[in-house]
Amino acid sequence: MLRLSPAFNRNFGKGWLAAGYVFLYLPIIALIVYSFNDSPLPNEWRGFTLKWYAALLHDTEMQAGLWLSLKIAFFTACGSVVLGTFAAFVLVKYKRFWGRTAFSGMVSAPLVMPEVVVGLSLLLMLVSVQRALGFPERGVLTIWMGHLLLGMAYATVVVQARLQELNPQLEEAAMDLGAKPSQVFMLVTLPMIAQAMMSAWLLTFTLSLDDVVLSAFLSGPGSTTMPLVIFSRARLGLNPSVNAVATLIVLIVSIGVIVASYMIARAERRRQQEMAAAYRN
């Protein structure tokens, strides 16, 4: 029987990990590099230039799509975290109540259903409601509703995983000291799940920012998001200005992730120090 040395196993694993990172991030690096390409052709390098970034200053369609996508993503992330936290709290703290199985299935359904099915069903529902009530018209509100439906499911999974790891004795101790349930949630539970909520916010913001399928079904006149603008231009042939927009998005998301990671790590260190001080006392 062939036995491999520990050094070979270790190097083999590192090699596969490096290959995986190259496969994932090499296209992004190439996109960033070619955003500075002087050639209008996406696969021909003619030299360094910033003209495609300057062209974005006059591209009103792309600017409007980017601004709309950022607004929808921001409000989607905020709404998803709020609703997802409440849903996760109910599923973790209340093990038995009428309709729990149906509620859990409805929360998790957007995770396993194709976005085409979700988008088509939402479109049919909104068209029926609009015919009956005259509201809402397809636009920013309907896009936000579709993104919120999908984002809430992801936020629920993230926050629920954190809630299941919490020590219930901490909440019980707070109630023994006279705290009301609302005070226990705000002063004990919420600080302990803040990191998971931040992670859920970043995840749902990213999902909403690059969503194409739901936005295509739910958008209307004057409500074209950035992914839809890029998708429509791809049919006629992309130019490096799209690479410039993507580079700016990568930069914004990277800065957000770095700042959030720093804040989460600092909050975790503070929490560990407070717990250590409480144990010493």
Image (cartoon, grey):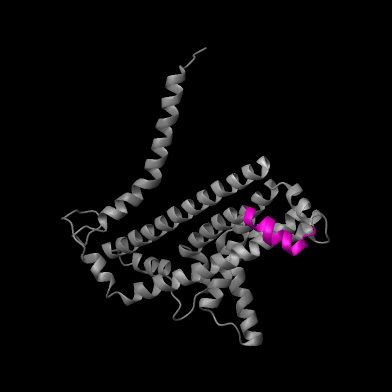
Examine the structure image and report whether residue 182 is included in the region drawn in magenta: yes
**Magenta span of residues:** 178-192
**In the rendered image, the vertical position of residue 136 relative to residue 149, given as above or below:** below
Residue 103 appears at what percent x and percent y?
74, 61
Examine the structure image and report whether residue 97 is included in the region drawn in magenta: no
Q: Nearer the viewer, residue 92 or 189?
A: 189
Could one spot residue 55 in this view of the protein?
yes
**In the rendered image, the vertical position of residue 97 relative to residue 223, given as above or below:** above
Residue 194 appears at what percent x and percent y?
60, 56
Magenta: predominant secondary structure element? helix
Q: Disc count in the image?
A: 0
Q: For the point 66% across and 86% down, which residue is it? A: 132
Name the residue at the front extreme. Answer: 281
Q: In which quarter of the image is residue 55?
A: bottom left
Q: Quadrant of the C terminus?
A: top right
Locate residue 24 relative to residue 85 in the image: left or right. Answer: left
Q: For the point 81% across and 54% down, which residue is it? A: 176
Q: For the point 56% across and 61% down, which residue is it? A: 115
Name the residue at the left extreme. Answer: 46
Could one spot residue 113 in this view of the protein?
no
Residue 238 appears at what percent x and percent y?
30, 63
Q: Nearer the viewer, residue 177 or 56?
A: 177
